[in-house]
Image (spheres, rainbow, N blue to C red):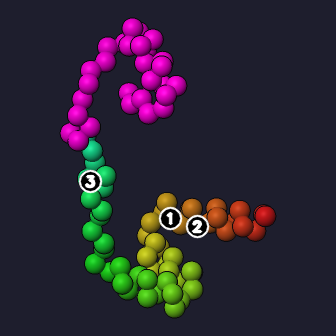
Amino acid sequence: MMFHTEKARTLKPQIEDAMWMEHIDIENYLQGNMQHPSSPHRDVEEFWDDYNKKSFSFIIKKYAQNNIFLNIRYIFRRIRGAVK
């Protein structure tokens, strides 16, 4: 557990009595993206060029057509936008 607030720090002694706790070095548990940014995809420039010049429907068809999750999310957003 990480105690960031003053309130959490005051509760820490009570919590320590109820469970086993050990101090760790957080550097050993950081994920890659927390240490450095991801490298951009090789087609990032092409994507942004298409994004600025083409329609959103074109972008979905070109970059997310075979990704069922993105297609479902797009449909729900369209429905939500129509309902508002």
The disc placed on residue 53 is none
Residue holding disc 1 = 70
Q: Position of residue 5 (x, y in %)?
A: 48, 32
The three-letter code of the residue at mark 3 reads: Gln
Q: Which residues are magenta?
A: 1-28
Q: Position of residue 49 (x, y in %)?
A: 43, 88
The three-letter code of the residue at mark 1 reads: Leu
Q: Residue at x 43, y 76 (%)?
A: 63
Q: Position of residue 46 (x, y in %)?
A: 37, 86
The disc placed on residue 74 is 2
Residue holding disc 3 = 35
* Callout 1–callout 2 Cβ contact below 8 Å: yes
Q: Position of residue 2 (x, y in %)?
A: 39, 30
The three-letter code of the residue at mark 2 reads: Tyr
Residue 7 in the image: above or below residue 29? above
Q: Secondary structure at mark 2?
A: helix
Residue 13 in the image: above or below residue 39? above
Q: Secondary structure at mark 3?
A: helix
In this rendered view, identify the residue nearer to me: 83 or 71. Answer: 83
Q: Earlier in the sequence, mark 2 or mark 3?
A: 3
Q: Earlier in the sequence, mark 3 or mark 1?
A: 3
Q: Residue at x 26, y 53 (%)?
A: 35
Please tell me how crowded label 1 is: few (under 14), some (14-19), or many (20+) other residues with Cα within 10 Å.
some
Cα distance in 3D space between marks 3 and 1? 27 Å
Instruction: Find the residue positioned furthest to the bottom.
Output: 53
Q: Split into 4 quadrants, where in the image is the N terminus?
A: top left
